[in-house]
Image (cartoon, rainbow, N blue to C red):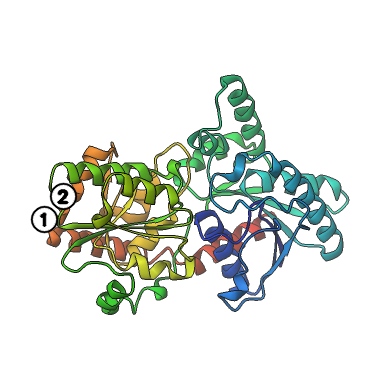
Amino acid sequence: MKVLMIAPTPFFSHRGTHIRILEEARALELRGHEVKILTYHVGDDIHKYIETNIDVRRIRRWLFWYKITTAGGGGDWQKIFLNLFLIRKVLGMTLRWKPDVIHGHLHEGVIIGRITQITFFWRRSLRLVADFHGSLVGEMKSHGYFRDTYVMKIFNYLESRINQMGDAAVVSSADNVKKIRNARHDKRAYHLFDGVDISNYISLESNKDELKRKYKIPEGKTIIVYTGGLVRNKGIQTILDAALHLHKEGVAGGLHFVIGGDAGDWIASFILKNSLEKYFTVIYPLNYFLLPEVNALADIAIDPKNVHSKQASGKILQYAAAGTAIICADRKTNREYLGEGGFYMPDLNPQTLAKKILSLADNPKEINQKAQYAYQSIERYAWKTVGKRLEGVYKSVL
C-alpha cells in the first residue's frame, strides 16, 4: 500500500509523539508498504540515524522564525499558518502520488486528512485513518491554555466532531478508546498501543558500569530515571519536589536522579536554586537513539504523567525493556502494559512519591522482582506487532 502520513508537528523531535509516528512508519515499511510523511519545515533528519526509505516531505520555510520543537507548542498562533501550508502540501501530494491510505496523526492531522478526502471526493477508494495520540482538550488544558470556560466548551465540541472523522480510528491509550468509540457512529476505534524494540536493550545490562562512567553517574547510589518530554504537564515537577522533600528530610544521600529529555533549562534552574546538584544529572537534549543507554542506568524509573491528557505512555515500555522497576499512575493503559510489573500510585504527589522511592531503595529484592515481571509483560509490545495491527486496520477500511 501507499500510505501518506500527515504529521502536523516539527518531525522529527526526540519525544513521544514523534517516536510513535516514526516507529509506526518503520513498522509499515518492514511489512513492504511505501510511506511518505508530510510535516513542518523544522525538525531533525531521521536519515542521519537510521537506514530507511521513508520519504519525509516538508512545507516551505515561509515562517522562518518558527523554530519550536518542544512539546507544548500546539497553542502557538503560527501553527494556523503552518497547517494551511501543510494542507496545500497534502493536497498536492495526494493529486500526484495517489495514496491508498491517508493516515492523520493528532487532531490537526485528522482535520487535514478529512479536508483532503472531501477535496478528492471522486476518488471513492481514498481512505482516512485517524490516529489519536491523546485528548485535544485534555492536552491543551494540561499545558495551561484554557483561561475561559466558554473557549473550552468550543474546543470540547470541536474535539467531539474530529473524533468522528476518518473511516477508522486508532487510539494510543486504552483510557481513551471508549470515548472515541462512543463518539463514532461506526464504532470503528481500535487500541493501537505504543511499542518498543527490545533488541536495543539486550547488550546494555552488561555495560552498566561503562554507561555510568560515560554519563558521570556516581557509584553506590540507587539511580532513579525519568526520560521524556521536559515540560511541566508531564509531571516532572512532582519528581523535583519529591527530591527536594527527601533532601529536606535528610534521607536523599543514597539516591541519584537522572533526567533526560528535550528542553531542560528550567529543571537545571530549579536544581541550582534548591542546592540539589549532587543528587541530579540532567541530560538534554537527549537523542531518541541514545534513549536506551540512559534508561539502562536505572534501578527505578518514574512516569509521573497524570490522567488528563488521555495519552498512552510509550516510555513505560522503554523502561520495562531496560529491566527496571517502574513507578507510575494507576491507569488502565499502564496496567495493561505492565501487569504485575508496576508500582501503581493512585495519588502521585511529591510526598507519596518520595515515600515510595525511599522504600524501594531499601528493598533491592523487590525492585528486581518487579523489573522481571515488567520485562516479561512487554514481549508482546514489539513495534513489528504494531505494524501488523495497523496494516489490519488499513485492510479493513479498504
Does any portion of residue 329 appear in the rendered image?
no
The secondary structure type at the circle numbered 2 is helix
Looking at this view, name the residue that lies furthest to the right. 122
Give the Cα distance between marks 1 and 2: 7 Å
Horizontal side of residue 387 vs 323, given as left or right: right
Q: Amino acid at mark 2?
A: Leu
Q: Nearer the viewer, residue 140 or 243?
A: 243
Q: Nearer the viewer, residue 184 or 293?
A: 293
Q: Quadrant of the N terminus?
A: bottom right
Q: Which residue corresponds to the image point at 45% horizontal and 67% vertical from the top-left?
A: 382
Q: Which residue corresponds to the image point at 30% horizontal and 54% vertical from the top-left?
A: 339
The secondary structure type at the circle numbered 1 is loop
Within the image, what quadrant is residue 145 found in? top right
Please provide percent x and percent y for residue 346: 28, 38
Q: Quadrant of the C terminus?
A: bottom right
Crowd tier of the residue under label 2, counting other residues whose Cα lies within 10 Å: few below 14, some 14–19, many 20 or above: some
Please provide percent x and percent y for residue 239: 31, 46
Q: Amino acid at mark 1?
A: Asp
Q: Is residue 158 above or below residue 201?
A: above
The residue tagged 1 is 362
Q: Nearer the viewer, residue 138 or 142?
A: 142
